[in-house]
Image (cartoon, rainbow, N blue to C red):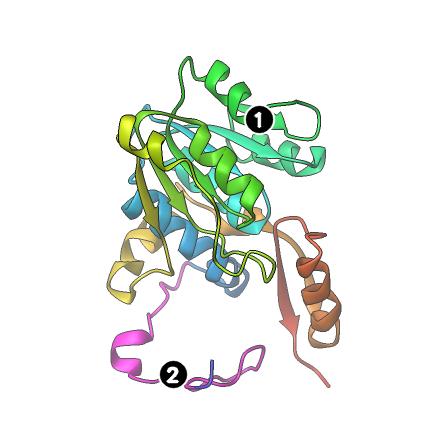
Amino acid sequence: MNQAPGAFAEEVHIPHADVNAVPLPDSIDAETAAGCGCRFMTSFHAMAHRAPVSAGDDVVIHGCGGIGLSAVHIADALGGNVIGVDLKDENLDKAEELGAVATVNASEVDDPAGEVQDITNGGADVSADGLGIKTTCQNAVNSLRKGGTHVQIGLTTSEEEGMVPLPVDDFVSKEIDFHGSLGLQPSRYSEMLDMIESSKLDPATLVNKTIDIHEVPDELAAMTDFNTLGIPVCTDFTS
């Protein structure tokens, strides 16, 4: 961000730090704190505030990368019955490890949304798109029951340029709500940190590996190609 340069540095300038800098409890170590980064805290805001997920809700997460797996873990902690949808078995295995009660491999079925409708006996209460492409966004919306809520977490690609066709008539006839979710307000970090301290959430379970600063470019390239699992964390800044 131009107003706050310094990503992947040991020290970062924080504008209005009296508001934007959130102190960490002593019980939360650096790796767990890194796991709380953009993917996790954005998913927390999506599931806890924008949906919001309640105990017993059927929740489907389309796209089980770092954002989607974080959403699976958080929705499970909030009491949801979570279904993970992805193209890769390893991502779906991780979703089950993080609390998903069922998974759907979208590459092996003709209609992933229909599969979710069958699993939930009529549709999910909450859906989320953690990827941001047309297919996952549409499938997520089509997975909902009447009166359901969709939360868009993933930003669209350069191909979509922010424009995804959606079944507007279904939004009307089924009274579906569509919510966007961006980041987490500093004033609400305490909710997430309290759940971590009480062991209801564990961002470290999303950390699939630790890397040094020289490996960051290759890792970012792998993310661009959707070739990462969970959250990589940079722990070594030596030159």
Decide if residue 182 is in sight here.
yes
* Amino acid on which disc 1 is placed: Pro
In which quadrant of the rendered image does the C terminus lie?
A: bottom right
Residue at 33% over, 43% down: 178
Q: Using the image, determine if residue 231 lies above or below residue 88.
A: below
Q: Which residues are magenta?
A: 3-27
The residue mark sitting in front, 2 or 1, is 1
Query: What residue would you read off at disc 1?
Result: 112
Instruction: Name the disc covering residue 163, or none.
Output: none
Q: Main structural element of the magenta stretch: helix, strand or loop? A: loop
Residue at 58% over, 77% down: 8
Horizontal side of 224 relative to 149 (left or right) equals: right
Instruction: Name the disc covering residue 14, or none.
Output: 2
Q: Quadrant of residue 19?
A: bottom left
Q: Using the image, determine if residue 123 lies above or below residue 132.
A: above
What secondary structure is found at the residue carrying circle 1? Answer: helix
